[in-house]
C-alpha cells in the first residue's frame, strides 16, 4: 500500500469513528428524550399553575409544620417565575419554622434564601448563608438539604472562577452520593460537576455528567429540573460542534413546554440566551437578536444579575458580527462592570482579553495596556498553574478512586480489623496493669489495717489489765499554760482534776450535747480554767480530749459486748455521743488508723 492509500485509509477510519461516536451520542440523547417524553405524558395533567392556586388557597387554613411546608413549596414553584413572590413566601416559611423550632423547615428556608441570592448574582451573601449552616446540616440527617447546599456552594465557586474549590466540593458530594446510593444526591453531584466542566469548556465531560444527573432526575419523576437539563444538552451539543442536534434539543424543549408548563423566566432567560448564541453561530443574526432581546428583558425585569454578564457578551458578539466595533467595545465594558458586581472573575478575564484585541485594532495602546493589566491580575490570582495542578490532582484522585474502590475497601476493612484487634489487646493489657496495681494496693492496705488492728487490741488488753480506760490520754508535769503564760493555782487545779476524774468514771462524754461550758458548770469552775487544765494535764484541746474518751470507752465496750458491736454503726455512733456517722468514722480513724466497721468485722471474725 503506497503512502497516498495509507493517508486515505487513515482519513476514512477517522471520519467513520467520528460519525459512529456522534451517532452513539445522538442515540443516547434520543433515548433520554424518549424517557422524558414518557415522564411528561404521565405527569402532564399535573398542572403547575393549578398546583400553585391550590397551595395558595391551602396555606391560609393550614397551621404548624403543614403551613411551613406549603409556603416552602410555593417558594419552590415561584423561584423561577417571580423572585419577589418567592422571597415573600420563603420569608413567611422561615418565620413559621422558627416559631415552631421546625429545623427541617428552617434549613430549607435558609437554602431558598441562599439560592435566591445566587440567582440574583449576590454570591457573597449566598455563601454567608451556606457557611452559617455548614456545621449544622448533616447528609445523614438532612440528605436533600445537604446536597442542595453543597451543589450551590460548588456553583458559586465555579461562577467566581474558583475552579479548584468547585471541583473539590463536587467530587466530595459525588463520593457521599455513591457511598449512600441516594439518587437525589447523585443528581445534584452530577449537576455541580456538569456546571464546573461547562465553565472549563470541557464540554464532553460536562455533557456526560449532565446525562448522568438527568438519569436520576427521570428515575425520581421530578419534572422540575427537566427544562434545565434539556437546555444544557442543547448548549453542550452546540459547543461540541453539533448545532443541528442543539436545535433539535430546543425543538424538543419547546414541545415539552407546551405539553407541561412554562418553566419560568429564570430558566427561560438562559434558554433564549443559548438559542441566540446558536442562531448567531448559524449566521441568523435577526433571530438571534430576537431571542436575546427577550432574554435581556427577563433578566432586567427580575434582577437576574447572575445572567447579565453573559447576556451582554452575546450582545457584544452580535455587534461584532454586524461590524459595529464601537458598540461591541461599549457592551464588553458593560459586561465587565456587571461581572465585577457579582465577582464573576472568569467573565472579567475573558472579556478583558477580547478588549485587548479590539483596542489593538483601533490603535488604542492606553486601553490595551489597561485591559492587559486587568487580565494579568485576574489570571495570576485565580488561574495560576498551582490551581490548574490542583484541579489535575483532584481529577486524578477521582479516577484512582473509581479504579481501585474495591481494593481500597478491602484494605480499609483489614486495617479496621487490625486496629480493632490492637485496641482490644491494648485495653486488656491496660485492664491487667490497672487490676494488678489495685490488687497490690488492696493487699498493702489490708496488711496495714491488720497491723493497726493487732496493735489496737494489744493496747486494749494492756489497758484492761490496769483497769483504766483513760490511760491513753497524755499527762504532763507542766504547770504553765504556754499560750496564756498563766500560772495555775495548784489547789484549783487539783480540785478540777479530782472532779473531772469522777465525771470520767460516770461517762459524761457520751452525752452528745457535752461541751466546754456545760462541763465547766458541772465542775463549778469557769471554762477558761477548765480549758487550761485539759491543755496542760491531758495534753490536748477539749474536742480531742472528748473524742479520745469516747473512742477509748467504745473500744472496751466493743471487745466486751458482742451484742453491742453487732448493732447498726449509726446506733453505735449515737450511743457514744456522735450525731453524725461521718464525724464518728473520721474521729475513729484519726485515733486508730482504721475504720470502725473494719475493727468490728475483725473482732467478729476472731470471735
Image: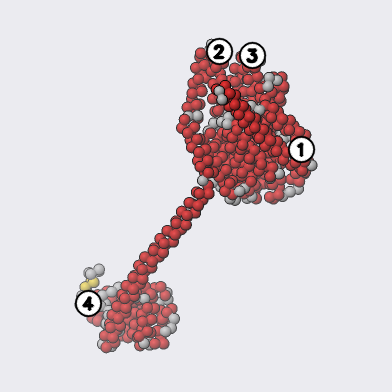
Residue 102 horizontal side relative to residue 492, left or right: right
Give the crowd class for mark 4: few <14, some 14-19, many >=20 residues within 10 Å: few
The disc, 3 or 4, on the residue closer to the chain's N-terminal end is: 3
Give the crowd class for mark 1: few <14, some 14-19, many >=20 residues within 10 Å: some
The correct choice, above or below, for 472 with respect to 164 in the image is below
Q: Distance between the residues labelled 4 and 2?
A: 120 Å
Q: How far apart are marks 3 and 2 (CA)?
A: 13 Å
The correct choice, above or below, for 359 with respect to 110 in the image is above
Give the crowd class for mark 3: few <14, some 14-19, many >=20 residues within 10 Å: few
Residues tagged 2 and 1 counted as in contact (Cβ below 8 A)? no
Q: Which of 501 and 571 is in front in this view?
A: 571
> Which residue: 49% across, 17% down?
369
Identify the residue position indicated by label 2 in the image: 361
Q: How far apart are marks 3 and 1 (CA)?
A: 41 Å
Quarter holding the C terminus is bottom left
Q: Is mark 1 on a helix, strand or loop?
A: loop
Identify the residue position indicated by label 1 in the image: 260
Residue 388 horizontal side relative to residue 232, left or right: left
Q: Is mark 4 on a helix, strand or loop?
A: loop
Quarter holding the N terminus is top right
Q: Which of 293 and 393 is in front in this view?
A: 393
Give the crowd class for mark 2: few <14, some 14-19, many >=20 residues within 10 Å: few
Where residue 366 sits: x, y (%)?
A: 51, 14
Residue 317 horizontal side relative to residue 461, left or right: right
The numbered mark at residue 476 is 4
Amino acid at each position: 500500500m503506497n503512502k497516498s492509500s495509507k493517508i486515505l485509509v487513515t482519513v476514512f477510519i477517522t471520519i467513520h469513528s467520528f460519525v459512529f461516536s456522534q451517532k452513539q451520542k445522538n442515540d443516547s440523547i434520543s433515548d433520554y428524550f424518549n424517557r422524558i417524553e414518557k415522564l411528561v405524558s404521565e405527569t402532564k395533567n399535573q398542572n403547575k399553575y393549578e398546583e400553585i392556586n391550590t397551595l395558595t388557597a391551602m396555606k391560609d387554613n393550614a397551621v404548624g409544620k403543614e403551613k411551613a411546608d406549603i409556603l416552602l413549596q410555593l417558594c419552590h414553584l415561584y423561584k423561577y417565575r417571580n423572585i419577589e413572590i418567592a422571597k415573600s413566601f420563603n420569608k413567611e416559611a422561615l418565620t413559621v419554622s422558627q416559631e415552631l423550632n421546625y429545623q427541617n423547615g428552617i434549613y430549607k428556608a435558609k437554602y431558598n434564601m441562599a439560592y435566591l441570592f445566587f440567582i440574583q448574582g449576590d454570591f457573597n451573601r449566598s455563601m454567608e448563608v451556606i457557611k452559617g449552616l455548614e456545621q449544622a446540616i448533616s447528609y445523614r440527617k438532612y440528605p436533600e438539604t445537604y446536597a442542595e447546599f453543597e451543589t450551590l456552594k460548588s456553583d458559586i465557586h465555579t461562577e467566581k472562577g474558583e475552579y479548584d474549590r468547585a471541583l473539590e466540593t463536587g467530587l466530595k458530594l459525588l463520593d457521599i452520593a455513591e457511598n449512600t446510593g441516594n439518587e437525589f444526591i447523585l443528581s445534584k453531584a452530577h449537576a455541580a460537576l456538569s456546571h464546573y466542566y461547562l465553565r472549563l469548556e470541557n464540554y464532553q465531560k460536562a455533557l456526560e455528567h449532565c446525562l448522568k444527573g438527568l438519569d436520576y432526575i427521570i428515575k425520581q419523576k421530578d419534572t422540575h429540573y427537566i427544562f434545565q437539563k434539556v437546555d444544557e444538552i442543547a448548549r453542550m451539543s452546540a459547543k461540541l460542534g453539533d448545532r443541528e442536534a442543539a436545535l433539535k434539543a430546543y425543538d424538543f424543549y419547546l414541545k415539552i413546554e407546551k405539553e407541561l408548563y412554562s418553566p419560568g423566566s429564570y430558566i427561560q432567560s438562559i434558554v433564549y440566551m443559548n438559542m441566540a448564541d446558536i442562531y448567531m453561530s448559524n449566521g441568523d443574526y435577526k433571530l438571534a437578536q430576537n431571542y436575546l432581546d427577550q432574554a435581556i428583558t427577563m433578566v432586567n425585569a427580575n434582577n437576574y444579575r447572575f445572567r447579565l454578564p453573559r447576556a451582554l457578551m452575546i450582545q457584544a458578539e452580535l455587534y461584532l458580527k454586524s461590524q459595529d466595533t464601537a458598540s461591541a467595545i461599549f457592551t464588553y465594558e458593560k459586561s465587565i462592570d456587571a461581572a465585577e458586581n457579582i465577582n464573576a472573575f472568569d467573565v472579567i478575564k475573558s472579556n478583558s482579553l477580547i478588549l485587548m484585541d479590539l483596542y489593538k485594532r483601533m490603535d488604542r495602546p492606553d486601553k490595551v495596556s489597561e485591559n492587559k493589566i486587568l487580565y494579568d491580575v485576574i489570571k495570576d490570582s485565580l488561574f495560576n498553574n498551582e490551581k490548574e495542578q490542583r484541579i489535575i490532582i483532584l481529577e486524578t484522585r477521582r479516577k484512582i478512586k473509581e479504579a481501585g474502590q474495591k481494593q481500597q475497601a478491602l484494605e480499609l476493612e483489614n486495617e479496621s480489623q487490625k486496629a480493632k484487634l490492637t485496641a482490644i489487646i491494648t485495653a486488656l493489657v491496660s485492664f491487667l496493669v490497672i487490676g494488678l496495681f489495685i490488687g497490690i494496693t488492696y493487699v498493702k492496705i489490708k496488711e496495714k489495717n491488720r497491723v493497726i488492728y493487732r496493735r489496737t487490741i494489744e493496747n486494749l488488753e494492756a489497758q484492761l489489765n490496769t483497769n483504766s480506760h483513760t490511760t491513753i490520754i497524755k499527762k504532763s508535769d507542766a504547770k504553765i499554760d504556754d499560750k496564756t503564760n498563766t500560772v495555775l493555782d495548784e489547789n484549783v487545779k487539783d480540785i478540777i482534776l479530782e472532779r473531772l476524774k469522777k465525771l470520767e468514771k460516770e461517762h459524761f462524754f457520751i452525752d452528745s450535747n457535752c461541751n466546754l461550758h456545760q462541763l465547766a458548770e458541772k465542775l463549778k469552775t469557769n471554762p477558761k480554767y477548765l480549758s487550761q487544765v485539759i491543755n496542760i494535764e491531758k495534753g490536748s484541746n477539749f474536742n480531742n480530749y472528748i473524742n479520745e474518751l469516747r473512742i477509748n470507752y467504745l473500744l472496751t465496750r466493743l471487745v466486751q459486748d458482742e451484742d453491742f458491736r453487732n448493732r447498726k454503726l449509726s446506733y453505735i455512733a449515737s450511743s457514744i455521743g456522735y450525731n453524725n456517722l461521718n464525724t464518728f468514722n473520721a474521729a475513729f480513724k484519726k485515733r486508730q488508723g482504721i475504720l470502725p466497721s473494719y475493727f468490728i468485722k475483725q473482732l467478729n471474725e476472731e470471735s
